[in-house]
Every structure is written in structure tokens, then in C-alpha cells.
Amino acid sequence: MNRPLAFRMRPSKLDDIIGQEDLVGPNGFLRKSVDNKTPISFILFGEPGTGKTTIAECYANEIGAKFFKINATSSNKKDLVDAINESKNYECPILIIDEIHRLNKDKQDILLPALEDGTVYLIGATTANPYISINKAIRSRCHLLEVKKLTLDQLQIGLKKAITSSKGLNGQIKIDEEAINYIARQSNGDFRFALNYLEIVDITYKNEDINLEKVKKVIKVPNSSLDNDENGHYDAVSALQKSIRGSDVNAAIFYASRLLAAGDLDSLARRLLVTAYEDIGIANPQACMRTKIAIESAYEVGLPEAIIPISVAIVDLALSPKSKAAYLAMAKAMEINADLPIDVLDYLRYTPVNVSEDEKYPYDMPEVWPHLQYLPDIIKNTKFFIINPKAESSYEKFLNEQYKKYLSMIKSKDIKKMKELFKKK
């Protein structure tokens, strides 16, 4: 009985890997590491079917290291301890951890010392965003390398190789160019998906000439409900946020469903949080908190049930009043900080130097606090926060009134004078 086509076509060396030129090509990062016989720890992140685990194993093989492989989801603490202990018998051993974003704290506490003292080199593989999902202590000890979805051309090359290879279909399938291109388009950058469907087509039409019409009868649903070009994912995410911003709840639900159908809960969760705080913001802070709780609940129950709390958050955000005032204020401040090296006023420093007692910050006089100048002189009149004239929510209107009162107060750097003024009162 033959093993699955995707398994048979799995590369054993870096040269056999399709795509990922910036990692395994002649000038690729991992290629240089192999050529120099200098092992490194790294985390590969990218969508399913892009070859993360394959790259990890090929790298370990070519650098000549003994490697141990565990899955963070299914392996227990003992598995990790055993792998680390056994690795001590080898020079420059490599530990490959699939689904590394699922590594709980107990396992991280075991792994970190071994990684720190060089007992093992780590190669992690994850479909999640490592900047969000991977423990900072682990992340700081590893290079983060993105494994990108294959392009249409790369998928076509890979499919043709599988058709002709002795490890693959050995030239025994008769399939036209149009049919191959269709399988590649429907695979949405996932080579494993493409090989699986090529195998199904071969089994279905054994010894027949295969054309586009026959392939379409087998492939009823594309790998993802996202658009089949490589920008489809980003288009769906962008459309989701714009729909929420425009209060079109129906469109927001639709675009979110495309991400959920593709199993992309991570991207959806991240975008909903960004949208909540960027576009709803101070108009409805409670909606921001409810979104965070909904996302936590979604991860707790997992897909497919995750769609239930996610749907509540989307409707809440889409129909909520909107305000970008807080976000725009921060964005403007960051622009100025990038352009101007401005020092903090002396009396606001953590440890003031050469400041007399009378000119020190008045911790014991809260009535003085709103009357002090806090911005440096060069930007002292700059207004980062701009009142939203179309504020809909009572909470944002309240904040605007508080802001107006604050702006009407006299501001001064003369702390001594301000202390004396309020002592008289």
C-alpha cells in the first residue's frame, strides 16, 4: 500500500524545497547557516502547508545534527524532559517543536535553561503570529523566520514534479495544463492541499485523460473561502475592519466568516482587537473590553464553536458609536517623537537634578497638578487629542467636556509660584 502522495514527495534536503528562496535559496539565511556549519535556533511561522516542519527537518539533516521532534499540543512534560536529557549525548543537538505556540508555562520553564546553556538548539514551527503567541523569553533567543505561501507558479512547478517523480505518480497520470493550473489556484498557497487533491484526482480518474471539467467535479470547495490570489487574506482582513468602521454589520459578518472558514482565528482575533481600540475607542470603551473577553472565550472553546463569541463581538463593534480620537492623538505624538529628540522637563524627571525644593513636583498638592506645564517648551501648545465634533456616545461627550475644562486652565512651569498661590486659597 502506497503512502500518501504528500508524504512521498516530502523533501529530504534544502535543494528539494520549492519556494522560500530567502530562507533556503543560494543566498538564503538557513542556507548560509548550513554552509558555515553554524547551527542556530529559530522559529518558523506561516500558514498550514507551507513546509515549516519539512524545512526544520531538512535543515537539521543538512547541518549534520541529531534532532528530536515533539508536538507542543500532544507531548507531555516527560516527553520534553526525555528529549532534552537524551540530546545531551550528542553534539549540537536540535529540538524541533511543532505548534510551539501551544507550549505551556511548565514546559517553557523546562526548555529555557537548556536553550540558554546550549544543551539544545531549538527549531519551532507555528501557524500563529510569534510576536503575539510565543513567550518573550523564548522569542528573544531565536530568529523569527516567516515561511510564505507558495505562489501560483511555484505550486504548478511542484505539482508537475509530483506527476513525473518516481516517488510521486511516476508519469502515470494524464492531466492537462489547465487542470494542473486549476488545482494550484484552488490550493491557496498550500502545497500539501495541492498534492492531496492531485492524488484524489488520480485515484478518481485512473487511466483516464483528465481535463479541467473532471477536476472541477472532484474539487468542490477551494482550500480557503478567501480569494485565490495571494492577496485574498489581506483583502478579507482589510474589508472586515472597513465594514465595522462603516457600521455595516452584514458585511462585517460576511468577511469574518471568510476568515473563520479558512480556520484563521488568529488573524481575525488580532484585527478585531485593533479595530475595537482604533475605530471604536473612547466612544465605547466597554465594547473594547467585551471584544477582548469574546476573543478569550473563542480561544477557550476553539473552532468551530469560536464563531459564537466572535459573532457577538462583531455585531457589537459594527453597531457601536465610533471614535478615532485617541488613536489619532497617539499617532501624531509618535510622529513628533520620531522627528524631534525632546527632553523631559526637569521637575517631571524620575530623579530631578539641580532642582530646588520649592521647584520640585508637588506630590502633596493635587490642586496644583492640573495647572502645571507638562509638555516641553518646544511643543507646549501642541494639541495631540482633538475633540471629535461628531461624538455620539455620552461617554465621549463627557470626556470632551473634561478636556475643554482642562484646556481652559492656566498652565505654568513656575512651581514655586503655583504652590504659593494654592496655599493662599
Image (spheres, rainbow, N blue to C red):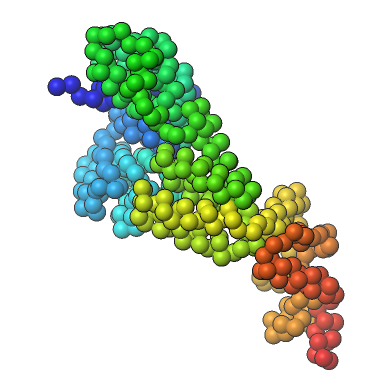
Q: Residue at x 25, y 47 (%)?
A: 74
Q: In the image, is residue 99 above or below residue 20?
A: below
Farthest bottom residue in view: 424
Q: Residue at x 46, y 43 (%)?
A: 257
Between 344 and 157, the one lying in front of the other is 157
Q: What percent of the width, then of the height, locates residue 398? A: 71, 71
The percent position of residue 376, horizontal first and vertical second, equals: 79, 63
Total labels: the figure holds 0
Q: Is residue 80 left or right of residue 375?
A: left
Find residue 67 and report its horizontal and vertical position in percent.
Answer: 27, 36
The answer to whether 70 appears left or right of 338 in the picture is: left
Question: In the rendered view, would you say 133 is above or below 326?
Answer: above
Is residue 419 depicted above or below 267 in this figure? below
- Image position of 366 with respect to 126: above or below: below
- Residue 136 visible (yes or no): no
Could you say which quadrant of the image residue 377 lies in?
bottom right
In the image: residue 148, left or right of residue 284:
left
Q: Is residue 6 visible?
A: yes
Residue name at image x 23 percent, y 13 percent: 206
Q: Residue at x 44, y 23 (%)?
A: 185
Q: In the rendered image, which quarter contains the C terminus?
A: bottom right
Rendered location of residue 152, percent (x, y)? 47, 21
Is the N terminus in the top left, top right, bottom left or bottom right quadrant?
top left
Which residue sits furthest left?
Answer: 1
Q: Is residue 264 left or right of residue 332?
A: left
User: Residue at the front extreme?
Assistant: 250
